[in-house]
Image (spheres, rainbow, N blue to C red):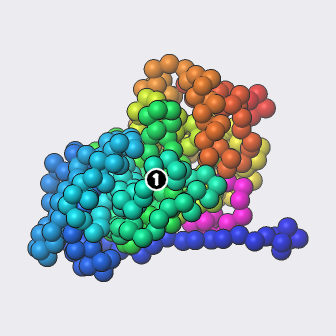
Amino acid sequence: MSDLAALVTTWTYPTRIRFGVGTVRELAEICREAGIARPLVVTDANLARRPLFEQVLAPLREAGLAFSVFDGVRPNPTAANVEEGVERLRAGGHDGVVAVGGGSALDVGKLVAFMVAQSRPIWDFEDVDDHWRRARTQGIRPVVAIPTTAGTGSEVGRAGVVTDEASRTKKVVFHPGMMPRTAILDPALTTGLPPQLTAATGMDALAHALEAYCAPAFHPMAEGIAVEAVRLIFEALPEAVRDGANLEARAKMLAASAMGAAAFQKGLGAVHALSHPLGAVYDLHHGLLNGVLLPYVLAFNRPAIEAKIARLSAWLGLEPRFEAFLRALLDLRARIGIPGTLAAAGVPEPPSEELARAAERDPTASGNPRPVDARALARLYRCAFEGNLPEPEAV
């Protein structure tokens, strides 16, 4: 209690959320409330071709808002991708952004709205120390975020992930002004997501919640939200994969995704530290990689989290033991079709020592409940590539 009595920290929680089937119809009104009259709608080309995209545009058309669409978002966005969006925003005289899609589209939308106000390069605002204080706040455009996947929770976040092509690394750009004014969580917009993407994005949400729960920082609000997010995902994800039209399962996954993102301000860990370099180098889906890596990192972290995982296991209605939760996690992964190894997920060769060093440098590594260095991370890469759960003492 003496340590707790001396603790001073800051807790910041997310933005306004409109949740429920049909809430996308409120988009024009929500834009007006945010001061947006000429929105730039930011998405990816695949989503822009799907019928559900018209459900997003229809309220804007009906209200007479002068919008245009930027659909050039890449699956793993780069700085050039963001710059292209900034040019489109300036050329169209847009006064705000409606970001629609998965995590990449939401991140690019937020970054475009942020970078249009800046004169410095994007890497000057990497989430290191207090680099965000370098930014100009005047001119940052308001954002309305509409997720069509249940994974990243970027709709309630103040950051965006961008690939630095020069160094082949993923970097997090952060500023409080990037937080969307309103997030619209309409489960009907996620019903067309294919089973494989439903599974991968769902495992991304699970990785956020589980790593936040295990992170050693003291943040009981985040921890409580993470616990319930894990329960919702175990309950709803298999059904959302099995029957994509199940609105109850889709609604629970959208809620859990936002909850995971709200929770991970407590911290992330080695799952993300390992997946970021792999995604940057091999252009693989972030959630898929997280889903593959999660049991290996959990097993490695066991000495530091065994009691916490036993409590979590009990909350899920399982035997209150670490092994019970690990078995349930492996079963969930198998049931929804997430591969068991990095090799099966598309990593063509055992990850290199260079990738392990990049993972060690990743900011999320510092939140792991057990300290990790390049040697431990290289061993975890090998375990995940070969399919051998690590013995903690051997790593």
Magenta run includes residue 80: no
**Tag 1: Cα neighbours inside 10 Å, few (<14), some, or many (≥20)?**
few
Q: Is residue 333 left or right of residue 315?
A: left
Depicted 391 relative to depicted 112: above or below: above
Q: Which residue is depicted at the point 72% across and 48% down? A: 369
Q: Can residue 67 be seen in this view?
A: yes
Q: Residue furthest top?
A: 349
Residue depicted at x 45% and y 49%: 121
Q: Is residue 38 left or right of residue 337?
A: left
Q: Measured from the top left, where is residue 188 in percent x and y?
A: 26, 62
Q: From this view, report whether residue 343 is shown above or below residue 312.
A: above
Residue at 26% from the left image edge and 79% from the top image edge = 32
Residue 73 screen position, x and y as percent = 30, 46
Depth order, front residue of 136/47: 136
Q: Which one is in front, 207 or 265?
A: 265
Q: Residue 79's x, y, as percent?
A: 40, 44
Furthest toward the right, the residue is 2
Nearer to us in this view, 236 or 142: 142
> Is 230 drawn above or below residue 140 in the view shown?
above
Q: Which residue is drawn at 83% across and 72% down?
A: 6
For numbered disc 1, what is the local secondary structure?
A: loop
Please, what is the three-letter code of the amino acid marked with disc 1? Arg
Quarter of the image for the C terminus: give it: top right
Question: Which segment is the magenta one?
Answer: 214-225
- When the figure is inspected, residue 328 is found, relative to residue 142, above or below; the finding is above
Mark 1 lies on residue: 120
Residue 357 falls in image quadrant: top right
Which quarter of the picture shows residue 101?
bottom left
Residue 253 appears at what percent x and percent y?
Answer: 41, 59
How many numbered marks does the figure carry?
1
Q: Is residue 291 left or right of residue 33?
A: right
